Structure formats: structure tokens, C-alpha cells
Amino acid sequence: MIPESFKQDLLNRVDIVEVIGRYVQLKKAGANYTGLCPFHSEKTPSFTVSPAKQFYHCFGCQKHGNAIGFLMDYGGLGYVDAVKELASSVGMPMPEWQPRSPEEAQRRGRETDLSALMQRAMEFYRVQLKRSPRAIDYLKGRGLSGEIAARFGLGYAPDDWQGLKGAFPDYEDAALVECGLVIEGEGKRYDRFRDRIMFPIFNRRDAVVGFGGRVIGDGEPKYLNSPETPLFQKGREIYGVGHARESMHASRRIVVVEGYMDVVALAQHGVPYAVATLGTATTPTHVTTLLRSVDNLVFCFDGDAAGRKAAWRALEVALPLIPDHKSVRFMFLPQGEDPDTFIRGQGRAEFEARLGRAEPLSSFLLGELRGRYALESAEGRAQFLAAAKPYVLQLTAPALRIQLMNEVAEIGRVSDDDLRRIFEPDAKRRDTRPGPARVDKGRPGSPEWHLLVGLVADLDLAEHVDPALLTAGLPETGALLAIRAMTEQAGEAPTFSVLIERLEGSPHLDLVLRAEQQSDERGFDRDTARQEFRDALAKLDVLRRQREVEELRRRGLASKQEQAEYWEKLKALKRLQGALPGVNGSPPA
């Protein structure tokens, strides 16, 4: 794990306005900056970046976080990669937070060496492309320009069994075999890729990790990919995702196609938001990575049996991963067409029109299942319901699951209640169990709400909250619970951006963000926040004392000791009420 101290120091040094400003056009608006949200389509800016809190928030789609979270959500980076990128931007070396074992140190060093070899191989292939009129003519014949070839780093592997000797004088180096560039067998060594157009495969850090080679002419196999290596795992990498990053955020969608040439051809013809899997079926990592970056994911397949089979595999992977606010759709091209040939023949407008008509995941699922059974008979409908059940139950998006169940019930000619009994036999029993007690969120204007707003505006105030006050007979409103959660984290989370990261997934996060919005709208400075905080503390103390007095009165004041205690507490309460809004022990002004 990355040490908390390093992460906090990093977030303190990074300017979140500068980080987000690389991708979003921001304008100064008072103490903050605003712009069009990069996470959803909008015409009026609802995206706010706070330099004081090092925090961003969209009031439209509710996306929020710190600089690390932005690079993860917008750039599709993993957590460690996002931290590395930020650290590099401010010149902070990543810490060695745990001594590496000799094996780990050797592995890391080996990966660095292999990356350098792959980069040198790409440069070699690019030079060879310029020297091969045949390869250049092939690319021109496919409608590709020199500019697009350069953008994707295309190259050419010469028709030579040991052509890479031109890049690697030490052709016997074992690393060339380890990274998949050279094959060794029966005492001989030779290049894996020969007489092929070379497509370098970049990871999310824009480092070359593998290659795809497309044969020139009619040889077999048509496409040859790098093998699995310490750098390259087909199930994790996505071809073209780095080139598509900017455009897919602008269009809010990404198209997944099957081949490297499809990706490059679509970019050539004005559709730069396409990517491809690497000669393997769609994996959960592919879907999760892409849905983290966009709201609309479209799988584009050939319309033949193989294409529909691949689409069905993608559907099965996506079902448990798609949330309610995202969409996964499927686009099938005419028989004999692929994205490359289609866009060259029909053009960008027709391709994007078909994208707009792509079939939603639910429609594709139900259409495929309906076609397998004779729905005019009771037996056929029963078979349909049995086949639909495992797919529906995989859905974790609650709204989509309900919608799909309604449609399944209609097709199967059963009531919604009957379908629930079929799909979820224990649903009725679960529904009759008492639900969790309803928690009052704490209305705006209540003392606990003002306390929360003041605390959000100035986290230093957390040390002045008496834990006993938060547990001494006050009603457990959402605001009070949120204050408890904040004060528990305050010592470990000195900045608001770190605090929000700590509260991610907490039921109290929504209220904290609402309080932050109110403090921002009211333009709280340090003095205003502290006054709000002092007044709220005093009022909460009054409420606590009132409850104590009422409890003594309720018990009947039977003894002289109880009567004396009652009058003492009542006098103290009256004095405190008369002294509002100040109170002893409040934080310094």
C-alpha cells in the first residue's frame, strides 16, 4: 500500500485546478473554478473545482473526488498508476514503503529492461515501414494516411527470418525471447513477426507492451499477436485506449471492435473513440476499465454467427458490471462487413447513425432468448423463464433489474408477483422482515446541520467537538452520524480531499457533500465557519441539557437529591440559553 503520509503530501503539493485544467476548460467563478462536466453531457456548467479544498464536484451527475480520483475516473488509470502520474508531475519520487524482496526487485528491473526492448523494436519497425514501398502501398490501399499511421505508431516487420538483428546486435539475448519478439526452438532463433504491418500495443501509461502483426496479402494467420509475457496480458490490455481517451470523453461513448485495423480505419474516417480487445474474448477487466471512463459502451460486431456469439459472451461479462446510470449496447454490421470496410464504403455519418440505433443490452438479451423457445406454448414459456432467470439474477443494477423482470414477466405471461416467486423464492420472506429504522437526515437549519456545515468549511474545528456531546441523548440524525464519521477521520485526514476519499462508500458521504455545497454557496470564510460552528455547538448543548432536565422531571423527582439535581440543571440550562450563541469551551475565534 502507498503510505497515507505520502498520499497526503502529494495531494497538498498538486494543484487540482492545473490537473483538471489539462482536460476541462475551466473558468474562475469566485473562489472556485467551473466548467462543463467531463463525465456527462451538459450545456450549462455544473462542474466545480475548489482549489482551497483540492476537490471537484459535479452538481449534475454527482461525480466528485480529488486529483487521484479524477485521473482514475477520467483517465481510466488504476489507483497506483494515478498516484505515480501525479507524483511525477510534481517531481516526487514514489516511496519504497516496503523493502522489496530480491525476487520482486529482480522482476521490476526485468520489466524495465523489457520495456526498453519493446520501445526499440517499435522504432525499428517504424523505420522499416518508411523503407518499404510495398508496405506503404498496402496501407494507402486500405485508405490510411501517413498522419494516422504515425499517430498509431504503425511499422513494418521485414520479410527476414532475423530482421531484428538490425535493432539488436546481441540477437542471442534471452530477453528478446522473454518479451515475445524472437522465437527459439531446436537450437535456432528467428523473428516472430515477418512481412507484417506492425501495430504497437500501449498500456495505460503509454508504454509499448506488445505488438499485433497483420499479414500483407493472403497469408495465414491474418493477425499474429505477441504471446503472454511479463509485460503483456491480453485479458487486461485494450488496443487504442490511449489514442481514444480524449475523444471518448468528449463523445461520452466508446466503441469496442474486433481488430486493430478497424480501430485505425475508424480513426482515419473521423471516429476516434474506438478500441479493440486483443485477440481474446471480452473480459471483466475490459468492461470495468471502459465503463469507468464513459457512460455509453457499444460493442460492434460482424452480423454473422461468429459475431453474434462474441456479442453474447460480451453480454454475459457485462451483466453483473453495468450500473443503472451506464448503458451497454450492441451494433451488428451487415453480413460480410467489418468496421473497416463499412466506414470506407458507407462513411462516418452512416456508421454513427447505426451507432445511434445500437441495440440495448436488455433488448439483445431478451431477443436472443425469445428466439430459442416456442412461446406460443406453456412449455415454451416455462423454458424461456428458466433460461432468463440466471441472466436476470446476475444484474446488480437495481432499476435495470426491475425493468428487465417486468419485461420477462410480460413475455412469459406471468404476474410480477409470480415471477418474483419463481426468480426469488425467498423474496416474500425478506420483504416481511422489519426494515432498518428510518434515520432523520437532520433538516437544514437544525443545530446539527449547522455544525456539519461549519465543520466541512474548516476541518480544523474537528478537534473542538466533544465526543460526549455527540452521544449524550441527542436523536441520531444523519447529520449527527456524519459529524461522528468526520471527527473519527479528522486526525488522519487533514484535508477535505483526503477526507472524502476516506468516506467513499460511506452512507454519510452524501450529507457531507451537501454540507460542502451549502458552505460553498454561502461563501464561508474561516471566521464565518467558526461562528457557525460555535453557535451550533451551543444549541446542541442546550438540547442535550433540555433532555436531561426532561428526563429528571419524567422520573418524578421523588427524592430531595433528585429535586436538587433537577433545579441545579434547570438553572444551568437557563443561564446557557441566556448566553446564546456563545458558550464556554467553544473554539477560538
Image (spheres, helix red, strand yellow):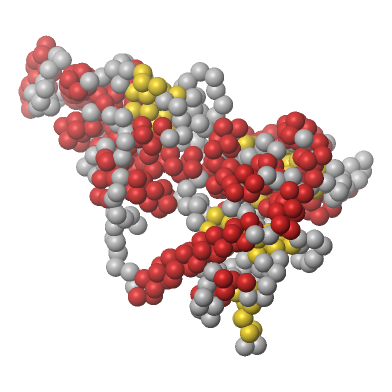
Note whether residue 192 is visible. yes
Q: Residue furthest top?
A: 578
**Vertical comparison of 433 with 167: above or below:** above
Residue at image location 49% in from the left, 24% down from the top: 36
Is 400 displayed left or right of 441 in the figure? right
> Measured from the top left, where is residue 571 in percent x and y?
8, 17
**Vertical comparison of 105 with 536: above or below:** below
> Measured from the top left, where is residue 334 in percent x and y?
85, 43
Residue at image location 51% in from the left, 75% down from the top: 169
Residue at image location 26% in from the left, 37% down from the top: 495
The one of 536 and 557 positioned closer to us in this rendering: 536
Q: Quadrant of the C terminus?
A: top left
Residue at image location 68% in from the left, 60% down from the top: 132
Is 18 displayed left or right of 211 in the figure? left
Q: How many marks?
A: 0
Q: Quadrant of the N terminus?
A: bottom left
Question: Would you identify the image quadrant in which residue 359 lies?
Answer: top right
Note whether residue 283 is visible. no
> Measured from the top left, where is residue 317 in percent x and y?
65, 51
> Measured from the top left, where is residue 177 in percent x and y?
56, 75
The one of 126 and 478 positioned closer to us in this rendering: 126
Is 50 displayed left or right of 76 in the figure? left
The one of 231 and 290 positioned closer to us in this rendering: 231
**Vertical comparison of 317 with 516: above or below:** below
